[in-house]
Each structure stands twice: as C-alpha cells, then as structure tokens.
Amino acid sequence: MAMSVEKFKAISPAEFFYRNKEIAGFSNPARALYQSVRELVENALDATDAHGILPDIEIRIDRDKVKTYVYRISVKDNGIGIPPQYVPEAFGKVLFSSKYVLRQTRGMFGLGAKMVVLYGQMTVGEPVEVITSPIGSRRIYAFKIMIDIKENKPVILHRASWPKNSDWHGTFVKVAIEGDWGRAKSRIIEYIRRTAIVTPYANITFRTPDGDVYIYRRVTKNMPPPPRETKPHPHGVDLEMLRMMLRSTNAKTLLDFLVMEFQGVGKVTAERFLSRYGFDPGKDPRTLSQAEIEALYKALREYNEFRAPRSDHLSPIGAELIKIGLQAILQPEFVEAVTRKPVVYEGHPIIVEVGIAFGGAIQPSETPILFRYANKIPLLYDEKTDVAWKVITENIDWSYYGVQFPAPLAILVHICGTKIPYKGVGKESVADVPVIESEIENGVRHVARALKTYLIKKRKEEELQKKAITLVKYIPEIARSLAVFVSKPNPATNGVTQELLESKLFELVKMKIGELPKGISSVRDVVLSVE
Ligand code: ADP
Ligand code: MG
C-alpha cells in the first residue's frame, strides 16, 4: 500500500487572512464593502478623537463606470497623520499597529486596514493610495502600496512627498475593492448614522455611489477625554503574559518588578504580597524558574487586596454626549442616559453606558429599537444573539415603566473595555457574561425609571388638559345665562356682555389649571376644536 507523505509548511499572517478572509468580516462583496468602510472610518476616528482632535471626516464610495462591481472607497480625516516611515507597514504588513497598548481604541488588532488592502488586491488588483501629513510635519507624503502576501510585507509601488502650504494634517486613504452596493447600502448608511449618534462632536460627510450625500454636522465641541495608556492589573495577566513581562522588564528585583510593571501596586502592597506568598523580594525577576513563575501567577490571581483596576484608559462617551447625539439624530421628545461605574471582567475594567429616547420623530415598533456599541463601534449584525438584546426583550418588563408596544422607544447600549467578551470571531455580538448582563440591566432600569417619571407627568398633564377643555366647553352656555341674568334688570351692570363674561370665566379656568393645551388661548378655540 502506498503511503502518502504529509507536507508541512508555515504560512505568513498575511497569507492566513488571505485564505480566511471571512474571519475578518470579508465573506462576500456586500459584507466586504461594509467592513472596508468600517475599518477606514474607525481608523480615521481613532486618529482624531482619541487624540483630542474634533473629527472632520469625509467618506466617499464611487462605482467604476466600466467594471460596475468595482468600488473605490476613500476616507479623509484631520487626524494625527502617520509618520512616513511607518506608512508602508501600517498598510502593508498584517499585525502591524500603533494600538498594541492597554488603551481603549476602536482598532486594536493591527488588521483592519491591511484586510481592506488584501481584499482589494484579491478582487481588483489596484494598490492602496495613502496621502498623509503627520501633525507638526511640513510635508505631505503619498504612497501606493500592495502587500507581498507570502512574505507579509509591503511592496511600495510609488512614493512622493512635497512641502505643505496649508495647515492640514491627517490622512487620506483610497482603495478599490469588489463590492455590492445594492446589498450593502442600508447597512452602510445605518453604520454611519449610528456612528454619528455617538460622535456628535464630529463632522461626517458621506457620498454614496448613487450621488446621495449624508451630512452629519458637529452639534457640540465637547469630546470625551482621550483615553490614557495603562499598565496591566495583576488580575488581568495570564501565565504567558507574565512570562514575557518577567523577561523584558528593566526591574532588578521582584519587588521593583511588581511596582513598575503593574498598575496600582505600590511598594507597601508589593512587600505585603510577596511576604504573604513567601517570595524573595530581592530576587532577580529574570531568574525565576518555571515552577516559580506558575506560583507567582497563581498568587497574583488569588490575592485580593490589590486596588481595583483603573479605568482611565477607557473612553466612555458620557451621559451628556449620548443625550446630545440621540437628540440630534433621532429627535425624540424625551432622552436620558447614564454612565455606570466601572466593573471588573477578568481583571479588565468595563464601563457600560445606556441611553434611552422616546417619542418625537421615532417610529413606533413592536420591540425597542436597539443601538449597540462596543468601544464606540456600532454593532449591526447578530443583534438577536447579543446580551443587550436579551436584557431589553427578556429581563425588562416595559409595561412596568409605562410603555405599551408598539411604542416609539430606542435604547442605546455602549460597552467599553480593553477586553470585551464577543461571541465568535465576527465581533458583532457580546456574550451574556453575568457581570455585563447585570450592568446593562441596571443601566436600562435607571434610564427607564426616568422615562416612567416623564410619562406619568405627561399623562397627568394630559388629563388635566382634558378636564380644562371640558370646563371651558361650558363657559359660553354659563356666560349666556349669566349675561341675561345680570344685564337686563340692572342698568349699573350694563356693558357686561356675554363676551366679557366668557373671557372672565376663561381666565378663572386658566388660573385653576395652569397651562392650557397648545393652540387654546380663548373660549372660541375650544368651541371650535370641540365642533
Ligand atoms: P489597527 O487599527 O487595529 O491598529 P489597522 O491595520 O487598521 O490596525 O491600522 C494600522 C495602523 O495604521 C494603526 O495602528 C495606525 O497607527 C495607522 N493608521 C491607519 N489609518 C490611520 C489614519 N487614518 N490616521 C492615522 N493612523 C492611521
Ligand atoms: Mg484599524
């Protein structure tokens, strides 16, 4: 019997994603078009708001006149730009990123831009075009780049630079891919609308292949404070990470290692911790044996007197901005929002924010309209499997809050953290981890209570107004009888006409009731509205 011989070989990260593009969300031309816009827009936003710059972002998709399956996507921002020496790898080497630090950004995998370039290369074959000017630079740099998939490295086809005579800084990226605008259209438009809801401090314009232009104008100059970079929390490292940290540290002793490499560990805490578990504080961290590293890892996990993880490397949107965003885009009659306190999930802090919008221009529907976000990225796919969907449709009894469906109700849920338990590799839905589920539920209950109070007050006012109308309705009749009664026999009351009595009685009702319904400023208005 002939034996077949297995052939072994390794592939590069670029080749891996070339073969498995579905993993990164590029499963078909429609999804790829959506994902490409998303990746480029998220890079543009990371380059602006995460650095304290009010974003001006222009997105454009053009359909090729001849090859109609070809779309050219371009995104221009006013961000920090990219230093020219990094441009080729930023767009031509998979898993090259400036975001591999503990700090909340939209991207953090070093993949997005390259995936767009790879997909474009597979389907159309044109290089990506990048024009950039870093903040503070006096020049503009232009590149045309493709990816050497086998080697996972950039191939620079064109490079140029020229002096800058404006004060623009930022980045322009243009790439051609095979897409399907017809099938991606509604999602892309919705993605941009939802992005605008949580970035009311941005100017965003979007020109579609059909020539339609969507403009979201900045409605506030307030931005969430940029997230800061932080060190890991002792509960947030795994065995391998600890091993790498021990290998690369500059600390000379175990004591210094703990103080220098972890957040919230002071000298006193470190000493107490080391003596509790019997470690030698003076030991060189590079000389720990395998068994000692494992013991240290277990001890770090177990010790519960470390300070809770900090959360200033997170960037919540803030209740005020959520309200502004919901108000500007949905134009509801009521909005409320809350930013919850940080909680800890596997050693990483997570902050949940919830917004609610009711009435006004919102169309009534059978279930609440849900806007989900993770680290400010709108999540559009797999809604029904998301923990937030479970909370608002299963955990909450809306009738308790005075809402009867169909109702014009929208709920916004934002989860931010450096570790988010996504379901599956698509990163479109969040798993129902208990601590996150209860945070969302508490947040929803908080804003729903505010809605309930509002609805009760509104109903009271409406009832009062109904009463007022009933009262006012009788004024003409009463006034007529009174006029007959007072004016005829007594000449002194001459001049007391029915009209005068009507208006006096009307004033009386107004005093009793307070505000009358809009459009009612005299008895006549009521008589007319009743007829
Ligand atoms: P990630 O966003 O996960 O880091 P990307 O492949 O999307 O990965 O981008 C790689 C790197 O290129 C980013 O980390 C960033 O440093 C840089 N970059 C990409 N787009 C821009 C942009 N519009 N402005 C500034 N830097 C950018
Ligand atoms: Mg990115």
Image: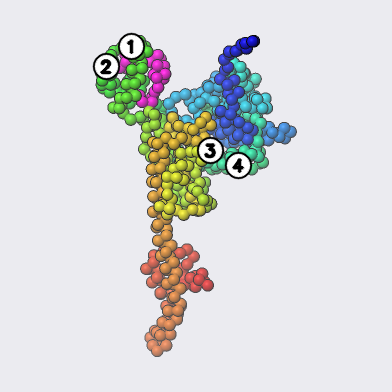
Q: Is 430 situated above or below 295?
A: below
Helix, strand or loop at mark 1: loop
Q: Nearer the viewer, mark 2 or mark 1?
A: 2
Q: Residue at x 48, y 70 (%)?
A: 526
User: Which comes sooner in the sequence, label 4 or label 2?
Assistant: 4
- Foreground label between 4 and 3: 3
Kind of residue indicated by mark 3: Asp
In the picture of the structure, the residue carrying the numbered disc 3 is: 382
Q: Which residue is mark 4?
A: 186
First along the sequence among labels 2 and 1: 2
In terms of sequence position, does the residue under pointer 4 or pointer 3 come before the other?
4
Please identify the residue farthest to the front as the structure is shown: 1
In this orientation, which residue lies closer to the viewer: 376 or 25? 25
Q: Does label 3 point to a residue whose CB lies under 8 Å from ligand 2?
A: no
Q: Which residue is mark 1?
A: 284
Q: Name the quadrant containing residue 27.
A: top right
- The residue at the point 61 percent across, 19 percent down is 149
Residue 503 position (above or below residue 199): below
Helix, strand or loop under label 4: helix
Q: Is residue 199 visible?
A: no
Mark linked to residue 216: none
Q: Residues within 10 Å of mark 4 (few under 14, many from 20)?
A: few
At which x and y percent is residue 453?
Answer: 39, 54
Q: What separation in Å lies between label 1 and label 3 (alpha carbons)?
A: 49 Å
Q: Are marks 2 and 1 in contact (CB under 8 Å)?
A: no
Find numbered disc 3 in the image and state the secondary structure of the residue it sits on: loop
Specify start and end residues of the magenta stretch as a single range. 232-257
Tags 4 and 2 touching, CB below 8 Å: no
| Disc 1 and disc 3 in contact, CB within 8 angstroms | no
Q: Quadrant of residue 144?
A: top right
Residue shown at 40% from the left, 52% from the top: 400
Residue visible at 50% across and 46% down in the picture: 369
